[in-house]
Amino acid sequence: MTKQDLSSLSYRAALCGAIMAFLVIVPDGRAQDTVPRDLLKAGPAEPRPRPVCGAIRPSETPSASNRDRAREASQRGQQAALLGDAPSAIRALRDAATLDPTAADVAFQLAGVFETAKDTINAVREYCRFLSLAPSSVEAKVVVDKIRILAPPKVEQVIDLPLAMFRSGIAAYRRGELSSADSAFTAAITMDSSWADAYYNRGRVRLLRNDRQHAGADFAQYLRLNPGAVDRIEVANQLAMLGLGRFSYSPARTFAWGLFVPGAGEFYTHRTIRGTFALLAVGGSAAVALMQKTSATTRQTERPYLLPAAATGGVIWVWSLLDATMFAQNSVDHERRVAFNVAPSRNGVAAQVTLFRSR
């Protein structure tokens, strides 16, 4: 083979390689839209080994009188349970749950009485109702473990409805159907309100839909349900970028408090160290200003430190007043921020840079 043949063969190989690389890099307009998998939580590969509580209708807010009556019935139920009278305890706690269906403690107590009475069906039902009322409580994990023990999933039970909706949301997200993905993750949360990853994924979807307020609420709920998350810092930074978790204070009210009481504006804006310093400094200046001294020449009582001490206290008072008011004003001012989002498009993935204001 001659050098010319080798050169021609090398040229053809390089040309084929360039064409293949071009086909890989340039997205095919007929291909399905894709989204990087690492933007969403993938969820478990297999159905989760726990029963599905199912969707529970939100409880209506009871009246004040019903709350009081429910509290009395709950106390009777607790006393009966302590005495070992399970039937009376169940009747009283059921009355309390009817009067106040929003009381999570009543659901927890009633489930415990049912569990003691070996009524596993009603115990699981009440534990599920407790989870729907208090998904982020400290007892939630214990309750989930109790449900696993009391009602283990059957061998033929391979359908996990929340997981099915969760996977449906991921599939819709990857197709670029953000509205459908939002609905699917919402359905999964409705059926399992303690699933942290579902809140995270819905927050990501809503962030891409520019629904920043609800996205922030989902991220905050994700951190509440999963305080030991490995990406906690990243999610917390995302919340800070969204401007959530910050308090805003009224500048007018801050000024009024600081005007009448030294350092009160600092206390109102929860800066107690500065407030304490201003209060003590102004008070100390007033005490020094009022100190009396008898003159050795005129034999008259005078206040030699009145002017310098009063000036010092006045300067500190004014400084504290202006400092607190400016801090309150900054807490309500809008800041310009730049957000960089990756959004699915018809031909692949598009980068979106958004200039917005956040609090």
Image (cartoon, grey):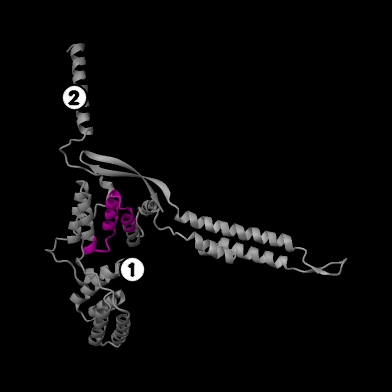
What residue is pinned by disc 2?
Answer: 16
Could you tell me the amino acid type at mark 1? Ser
Quarter-wise, where is residue 352 in the image? Answer: top left
Give the residue drawn at x 15%, y 38%: 30
Decide whether residue 205 is among the magenta residues.
Answer: yes
Residue ID at (26%, 78%): 112
In this picture, is 263 found above or below 70?
above
- Mark 2, Cα crowd under 10 Å, few <14 / some 14-19 / many 20+, is few
Q: What type is the residue that disc 2 sits on?
A: Cys
Q: Looking at this view, is 71 or 45 the one in front?
A: 71
Residue 195 x %, y %: 27, 61
- Please say whether residue 270 is visible from this viewpoint: no
Disc with the residue nearer the chain's start (2 vs 1): 2
| Position of 34 relative to 189 (above/below) | above
| Residue 350 shows in this picture | yes
- Residue range in magenta is 189-217
Please name the residue that numbered disc 1 is placed on: 137
Q: Nearer the viewer, residue 101 or 199?
A: 101
Q: Name the main secondary structure of what is drawn in magenta.
A: helix
Q: Do the residues labelled 2 and 1 touch (CB within 8 Å)?
A: no
Q: How crowded is mark 1: few (under 14 residues within 10 Å), some or many (20 or more)?
A: some
